[in-house]
Amino acid sequence: ALSVSGNRLLALNRGSQSVSIIDTGSLSELGRVRLSSEANDVFMGRNEDRAYVIQSASSTLSALDLNAFRIRNSTVLSDVPLKGVTSSDDKTLYLTTGFSAELLVVDSASLSVKEKIFVGNGARSIVVHGISGLLYIGKQNGEIAVVDPKALMAIDTYLLPGPVQALVIDNGENALFAMLPQSRRLLKLDLVSKRQLGVLELEAESHAVVVMGER
């Protein structure tokens, strides 16, 4: 996970049950947070002092203090969390779940579940539009559900030819990039018309995509 300023990078250390906080300028490790078990996702919002870690094996969600390099608080959820994003004001977390058709709406301060939104089974990826606040959820069946968190419901869908492993939004071009690992393709879609703007054929199965800006 990369901070909004681009100054900090958070990296999960597979096998050591920890998260490294890295200074992107010097590429040096500023500190490390030890976890109780292996984590499978780390994410952060605009507040660069805080990050969140998902440990699916134990259904645990933790908030990290990135200045003190420690776990601030943790909670065990009744559902199995998989991926997460923060709202634009950092007050709310949205978590996809395994074995459930619902998206969890979580208070970022208390880590308590406030609401659940039905999105259907098979959610594999999630991204939030920084301007509109809409959530885009990529699914195993090739569907991208567009969710309005204020209305607590899905308001639109995209249908793609394969499981959607990763999503990222380019705000400058108002475009959505979707990674389809089975067909080894990266699609670029217009956020308004849903029209395909481009496709990149990949040489190998891929699992992540990022948009690089001037920073």
Image (tube, grey):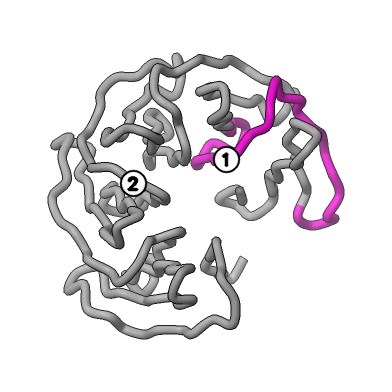
- C-alpha gap between disc 1 and disc 2: 17 Å
Q: Nearer the viewer, residue 131 or 136?
A: 136
Q: Residues within 10 Å of mark 1 (few under 14, many from 20)?
A: some
Q: Is residue 39 left or right of residue 161?
A: right
Q: Residue at x 82, y 34 (%)?
A: 31
Badge 2 marks a residue whose secondary structure is: loop
Badge 1 marks a residue whose secondary structure is: strand
Q: Position of residue 6 (x, y in %)?
A: 64, 55
Q: Residue at x 66, y 25 (%)?
A: 65
Q: Which mark is residue 200?
A: none
Q: Residue at x 68, y 31 (%)?
A: 38
Q: Position of residue 92 (x, y in %)?
A: 37, 30
Q: Nearer the viewer, residue 30 or 118?
A: 118
Q: Is residue 159 left or right of residue 9?
A: left
Determine which residue is flagged by label 2: 122
**Type of amino acid under label 2:** Gly
Corner quadrant of residue 180: bottom left
**Quadrant containing the C terminus in the rendered view:** bottom right
Corner quadrant of residue 70: top right
Q: Position of residue 19 (x, y in %)?
A: 73, 36
Q: Which residues fall within the magenta stretch?
A: 24-51
Q: Position of residue 110 (x, y in %)?
A: 45, 14
Determine which residue is flagged by label 1: 41
